[in-house]
Amino acid sequence: MRPADFSLSCVVPAYNEAGHLAEFVRALHAAVSRIAPRHEILIVNDGSRDNTGEIAAQLARELPVRYLELSRNFGKEAALSAGIDHARGDAVLLIDGDFQHPLELVPDMLTQWKNGYDMVYGVIADRSFESGGKRVGTSLFYRILNFSSRVPVPPNAGDFRLMDRKVVEALRTLPERNRFMKGLYAWVGFRSVALPFVPAARESGSSSFNLKGLAALALSGMTAFSTVPLRMWGVIGSLISAVALVYGVYIIADAMLLGNPTPGWATLSAGLMLFSGIQLLSIGILGEYLGRVYEEVKHRPIYLLARDEDGSPLK
């Protein structure tokens, strides 16, 4: 049973959102006030370069807003972690501040939470607004990620979700420094349900996730939750060794039994270049995994706070 007089924390990561942050927070406050009178809005400024900080600080003096400012840009995963660490509500809503996550879906999320689900997450129902390359890349990423993972990550599910307090506490216990939040949401488990939605257009500005950022996030997720790249190169190495053995036997038999000359330097040079490239690529994949281990063993904090303004403590 969920408490009748529950409290709700809304975590809003912000990076260069000055153009629409005030409008969004006021709309979020108006929407949440009708369904959760006891609430707080946590704005996490992830090292913005515009005046996002000044706007968020002003909102903290007007509305039930807690303003957290990170000491630099640590990335969205760290900003979400900071919000989760400081959220105090019985339920915690993660939502982007660009109006792409529909506020109309929040009451439905709370209804599912009251019905007993511990995590209610939004799933993008239509990706037609994205480029064909991004759609293919996203689909391929989830296929590879879930191929050998014991905990499948739901495709097209993002950070737009409502979590019960026990899910939040479980996430806070996870020690990873390289955080792939979509994988962590799935790993902790608990009773979950998906709600489909279609993202709206951004109110202003453009997304900070470019191709390079998306590729880095995909690499982080792959090395954190899948060993497919390591196993794949083990299989490729075995196949190449088998082919090389068969070809070697063929060359020996051809030379000794039929008297044909051994192929020349061109074949040898091409083979050396091919196998050298494969070896360097496999070493690079090993290096990515080893680099993640190196980052983890240093035990640096996920983020650092430069400012914490609490506009409305929950009671």
Image (cartoon, rainbow, N blue to C red):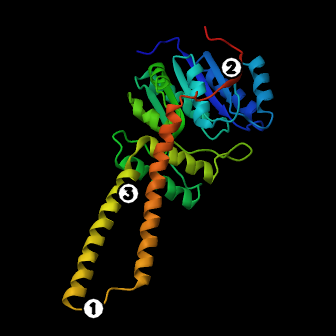
Identity, as a three-letter code, of the amino acid under mark 1: Asn
Q: Return the mark for residue 66.
A: 2
First in sequence: mark 1 vs mark 3: 3
Badge 2: how crowded within 10 Å, few (<14), some, or many (20+)? Answer: many
Q: Nearer the viewer, residue 283 or 181?
A: 283
Question: Going by the picture, which residue comes out furthest to the left?
Answer: 257
First in sequence: mark 2 vs mark 3: 2
Identity, as a three-letter code, of the amino acid under mark 3: Trp
The quarter of the picture where residue 239 lies is bottom left
Relative to 68, say whether 200 is above or below. Answer: below
First in sequence: mark 1 vs mark 2: 2
Q: Which of 33 and 79 is in front in this view?
A: 79
Badge 1: how crowded within 10 Å, few (<14), some, or many (20+)? Answer: few
Is disc 2 in contact with disc 3, using a CB cutoff of under 8 Å?
A: no
Estimate the x, y position of residue 311 in percent, counting from the top left. Answer: 72, 15
Q: Quadrant of the C terminus?
A: top right
Q: Nearer the viewer, residue 20 or 257?
A: 257
Dot 2: what SS? strand
Estimate the x, y position of residue 55 in percent, counting from the top left. Answer: 79, 28
Q: Nearer the viewer, mark 1 or mark 2?
A: 1
Alpha-carbon distance for marks 1 and 2? 81 Å
Q: Nearer the viewer, mark 2 or mark 3?
A: 3
Identity, as a three-letter code, of the amino acid under mark 2: Arg
Q: Which residue bears the numbered disc 1? A: 260
Q: Return the mark for residue 282.
A: none
Is disc 1 in contact with disc 2, using a CB cutoff of under 8 Å?
A: no
